[in-house]
Image: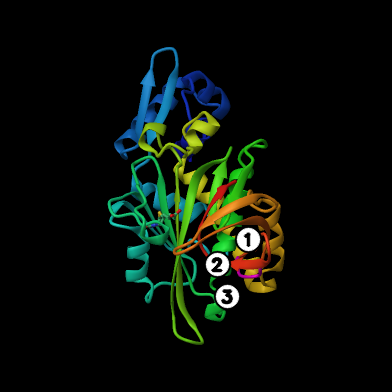
Amino acid sequence: MMKSKILEILEKNGSYVSGEEISKELGVSRAAVWKHIKKLRELDYEIESKTNEGYKLIKTPDRQIQFELERMLNTKIIGHKILFLEEIDSTNNKAKQIAFESQDGDVVVSETQHSGRGRRGREWHSPKGGIYISFILKPNISPERAPQITLLSSVALVETLNSMKSKMNAKIKWPNDILISGRKISGILTELSSDMEKINYVVVGIGINLNTDLEDLPEKAASLKVEMDQEISVKLFLKSFFEHYDTVYQEYLNNGIDQIIEKWKKNSDTLGKNVKIIGINETYDGLAKDIDENGALILKTKDKEIKVYSGDVSLR
Ligand code: BTN
């Protein structure tokens, strides 16, 4: 369809594309291009036009993103059902509310959150421009292995980011922050519902500073729009992320965590460094040597080797 072809060109470009370029690429007249742009606007696509510059896609309506994404996705498990919202308290809360009637791989996405939650009871500031995602997963694994789901999630995200631009250099900071040029671009909050033997569900919440303006972010944070120097299409980003996630998740279900740990280590920003870990009651200093199969950090302190299960890392 001509309308979706035009949208594709505008989405890929992220900035102004002239009517002439579009008409050449699609082999139709400029008047025809204009007519389709008008139709798209009637469907609530916000498209700006500027003399001498052309057209720029400002915003795709939410119901269209959900619909197009579900149709475009090339995945086996992730995103068969996507709930796409404009605003919510927290996508993790929503995901937990609907978890029992959901299937493995269903996703909740929101454009803002008014009570976004971070690790260790912190708030996760969730302004417009960012994207807030919760995966509902029902892997058939024992509850002790649940932390591995967080490991695979950071691998999927870091691989998505590094596939966007060759010099992106996205890294994982233990336990599960994603950094670009040393600045945090994303955080992960995994929540588990289980009994002693069996997992009911895992909710993996991921907040990403996608098109966030730097003035809306804490000082040491990064935004993908700023790194890429262009507005990022929410739809195309989610497509790529969900497809990477699907691949890694399937690999995990079929072959276990070993390969994923290797990838985690390859992309780690923490291993091999001298760090200070601020835990809940204690702090530890030492060399970050390795992680174990559940993501616990193996730290070589002055006099012994210890395992640290959670905390915040700072460099020494
Ligand atoms: C952290 O680094 O502290 C983790 C932040 C996790 C934020 C995400 S945004 C989507 C999901 N919903 C929430 O309320 N939190 C997670």
Question: What range of the chain is rendered magenta?
Answer: 292-296
Specify the amino acid type for callout 3: Arg
- Does residue 289 show up? yes
Q: CA separation, marks 1 and 2? A: 27 Å
User: According to the image, label 2 marks what residue?
Assistant: 309
- 1 and 2 marks in contact (CB < 8 Å): no
Mark 1 lies on residue: 247
Residue at 34% x, 50% y: name it. Answer: 63
Image depth: mark 3 or mark 2 in front: 2
Return the residue at label 3: 145
Q: Nearer the viewer, mark 1 or mark 2?
A: 2
Examine the rendering and report whether any part of residue 36 can be seen. no
- Locate residue 166, reporting x and y percent: 67, 37
Q: Is residue 4 above or below residue 268?
A: above
Q: Position of residue 23 (x, y in %)?
A: 51, 24
Find numbered disc 2 in the image and state the secondary structure of the residue it sits on.
Answer: loop
Residue at image x 55%, y 44%?
Answer: 179
**In front of the other: 238 or 217:** 217
Q: Helix, strand or loop at disc 3?
A: helix
